[in-house]
């Protein structure tokens, strides 16, 4: 699908673009003080990330975001949470108003819409995105139209234009997978063949987001690394010159995904250093990309 891909318009080989979730920057800082907006941009750029994925800024913040994106030479992609066609149309309108949106990461907030009704809704959402000329990748996510692994595999078969933003942590925790099995691998293969990009997060089958250790030694890492590499290889087989593969580290803050404990004074604190974990994921993904290229 020519329209539903990211390209920088060059004749350069297809490339990986490491991105950081803006939502995942929430609560990060030093000495008990959260980083400012400017500091977060600086940290993201210094770490070597090339883009940000997040909500569109408020109207009064748009000029500041434009300046910071330009200053740090970062791409920007945004999120949409439609329940119906009209919601997607509005999200596209706002994305065009902001400008420079690389792609839209869409979570379709209708988990009880299934089968042919779901296929029709996805088809409509993708069609308006095509008309707008903005790539639209449907995220694999719990509590959305893609929450069911088996149905999502069927949607992929029914809709050739459906490109996925892959986050397998949702299926791992929903299925309480602490390893793998032949049926899971077969379904994952069908989804990974439609990878337009990926999110970095590891589940152990009980928590959607875990600390993978200082060097990625958690036993589930090897499974996720294998799946990520498969998705990369599948994308590379179909990619053209100038194409871009976004891989976004997305470690959610407390009250959502981050596991917390209470200290002696009753304060809720995270058990992980989310920023250091994000940097570890970044290094792992860069290595997997090199492997995927060599294997192809």
Image (tube, rainbow, N blue to C red):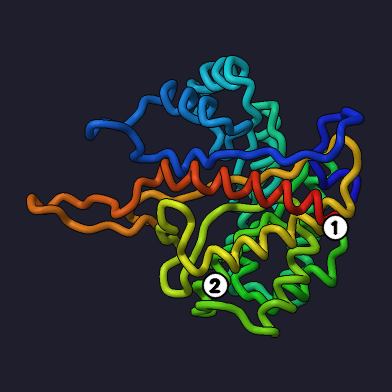
| Image: 119 above or below 84 | below
Q: Is residue 98 left or right of residue 59?
A: right
How many numbered marks, from 0 up? 2
Residue 45: quadrant of the picture: top right
Count residues near mark 1 (Cα–Cα under 10 Å), then give few for <14, some for 14-19, many for 20+.
many
Residue 124 visible in the displayed image: no
- Please give the name of the residue rendered at 58% of the width and 19% of the height, measured from the top-left corner: 72
Q: Earlier in the sequence, mark 2 or mark 1?
A: 1
Question: Comparing marks 2 and 1, which lies closer to the viewer?
Answer: 2
| Image: 65 above or below 285 | above
**Residue 87's x, y, as percent?**
64, 49
Mark 2–mark 1 Cα distance, whole angstroms, equals 25 Å
**Residue 242's x, y, as percent?**
86, 35
Foreground: 92 or 189? Answer: 189
- Please give the name of the residue rendered at 38% of the width and 49% of the height, measured from the top-left corner: 253
**Residue 137's x, y, as percent?**
72, 51
In which quadrant will I find the C terminus? bottom right
Foreground: 22 or 127? Answer: 22
Q: Spot the residue most to the left.
A: 265
Count residues near mark 2 (Cα–Cα under 10 Å), then give few for <14, some for 14-19, many for 20+.
many
Residue 111: quadrant of the picture: bottom right
Q: Is residue 38 left or right of residue 260?
A: right
- Please give the name of the residue rendered at 64% of the width and 57% of the height, measured from the top-left corner: 139
Q: Secondary structure at mark 1?
A: loop
Residue 8 visible in the displayed image: yes
- Please give the name of the residue rendered at 37% of the width and 55% of the height, measured from the top-left corner: 258
**Residue position marked by numbered label 1 in the rendering:** 161
Q: Secondary structure at mark 2?
A: helix
**Residue position marked by numbered label 2 in the rendering:** 172
| Image: 255 above or below 32 | below
């Amino acid at each position: 699908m020519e329209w539903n891909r990211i390209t920088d318009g060059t004749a350069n080989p297809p490339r990986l673009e490491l991105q950081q979730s803006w939502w995942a920057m929430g609560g990060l800082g030093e000495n008990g003080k959260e980083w400012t907006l400017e500091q977060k941009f600086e940290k993201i750029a210094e770490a070597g990330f090339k883009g940000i994925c997040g909500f569109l800024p408020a109207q009064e913040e748009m000029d500041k975001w434009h300046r910071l994106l330009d200053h740090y030479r970062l791409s920007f992609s945004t999120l949409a949470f439609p329940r119906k066609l009209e919601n997607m149309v509005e999200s596209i309108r706002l994305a065009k108003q902001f400008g420079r949106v690389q792609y839209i990461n869409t979570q379709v907030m209708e988990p009880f819409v299934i089968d042919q009704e779901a296929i029709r809704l996805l088809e409509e959402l993708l069609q308006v995105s095509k008309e707008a000329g903005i790539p639209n990748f449907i995220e694999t996510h719990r509590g959305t139209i893609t929450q069911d692994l088996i149905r999502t595999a069927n949607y992929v078969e029914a809709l050739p234009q459906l490109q996925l933003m892959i986050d397998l942590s949702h299926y791992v925790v929903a299925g309480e997978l602490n390893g793998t099995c032949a049926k899971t691998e077969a379904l994952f293969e069908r989804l990974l063949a439609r990878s337009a990009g990926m999110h970095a997060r590891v589940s152990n089958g009980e928590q959607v987001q875990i600390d993978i250790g200082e060097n990625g030694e958690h036993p589930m890492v090897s499974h996720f690394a294998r799946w990520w590499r498969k998705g990369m290889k599948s994308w590379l087989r179909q990619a053209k010159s100038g194409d871009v593969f976004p891989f976004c580290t997305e470690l959610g803050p407390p009250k959502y995904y981050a596991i917390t404990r209470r200290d002696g004074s009753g304060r809720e604190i995270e058990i992980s250093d989310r920023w250091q974990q994000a940097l570890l994921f970044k290094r792992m993904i860069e290595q997997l990309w090199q492997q995927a290229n060599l294997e192809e």
